[in-house]
Amino acid sequence: MRVQASMVRYLLALHCGLLFPTLQATSYNLQAPSSSASHSFPRPFHSQIATTPLNYQAIASATLEMLLQAETRRNLYEGDPKWPVKLTLRAAATFFAFFGMILFAVATSLTNKNFINLSGGGDWTDGMTLAPITLSFLYNPIVISILLFVRRGRTIHPAWHVVMDLIIWGLCVPCIVFSVDGGLFWAWVPTQYSDDGTVNCDFYNWLSRPCLPVLYTIGGLEIAGIVFLFLIFVLHLTLFVFACIDTKKWRSAAKRAKSPEEHQAHQPPAYTPSAEGSGVMADSAVK
């Protein structure tokens, strides 16, 4: 009977350890039976593994090593030492654009279903924000994919980034202005309660949260979407400044790479002093 009781305790502890492997093994009394028992059972192996912490930094480094080859990393650092910062900004812009697109799409849909725009056109103030957000959501992953996996780290001409980032943050400016100006959150009013604590949806309360909750749902979505849109504006404005600096460096490097003959051809005519001491210009200068 003692052996059977030890077996039952062990199986019960093993079952609990499988369900909750992150807890300490001592919580389930996973000690081997006493020496008086005819059978002894060792500590289960899975409980030892469960209490071993994972090295997430090593896992991330190994994943990066698998994704980026040595040639790609070398080309990235040779072409642009700031590539981790720029790719992080583009990844963050993609993340913000994804949530901003969802927020404004839901807000536009709810507004068109529950309200009528007397000027026509539906909820265009929220709908127009989808243009820069969608453009950012599509452009940034394409740039990251081309740079890392197509060009193997070879730098993309920064003029592309100058144009695209200018378009995105340039569209964000009027979208933020019109979205803030036409937001339904401006119609929020405090709730006025009667003497008995109830809310009457009359002239003073028909726009309050208890009487028109969809108005506050749409307003909350618009506020969250505007925050994401502003973050996208800041990120692409920063990337635009980086692209302008890179374009200037690119042009300077291209000029230095010209041959000496081409460089001499673009120089001004030389000044040649005469024997009498008066200077005369070369024939090319007179012509």
Image (tube, rainbow, N blue to C red):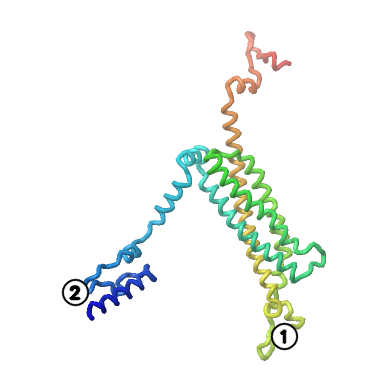
Dot 2 crowding, Cα within 10 Å, few <14, some 14–19, many 20+: few
Q: Position of residue 203 (x, y in %)?
A: 77, 81
Give the label on residue 228, or none: none
Vertical order, 79 against 136 (above or below): above
Residue at the disc numbered 2:
38
Taking the spot 35% from the left edge, 72% from the top edge, the residue there is: 15
Residue 272 quadrant: top right
Q: Position of residue 145 (x, y in %)?
A: 56, 46
Secondary structure found at label 1:
loop
Foreground residue, 252 or 69? 69
Q: Position of residue 274 (x, y in %)?
A: 64, 10
Secondary structure found at label 2:
loop
Taking the spot 63% from the left edge, 51% from the top edge, the residue there is: 138
Vertical order, 226 against 243 (above or below): below
Residue at the disc numbered 1:
200
Quadrant that contains the C terminus: top right
Taking the spot 59% from the left edge, 30% from the top edge, the residue there is: 254
Mark whose residue sits in front, 1 or 2:
2
| Residue farthest to the right, as pictured | 119
Dot 1 crowding, Cα within 10 Å, few <14, some 14–19, many 20+: some
Q: Is residue 15 left or right of residue 79?
A: left
Q: Amino acid at mark 1?
A: Asn
| Residue farthest to the left, as pictured | 36
Which mark is first along the chain, 2 or 1? 2
- Separation of residues labelled 1 and 2 (CA atoms): 78 Å
Q: Position of residue 259 (x, y in %)?
A: 58, 23
Quadrant that contains the N terminus: bottom left
Q: Is residue 153 left or right of residue 267?
A: left
Q: Amino acid at mark 2?
A: Ser
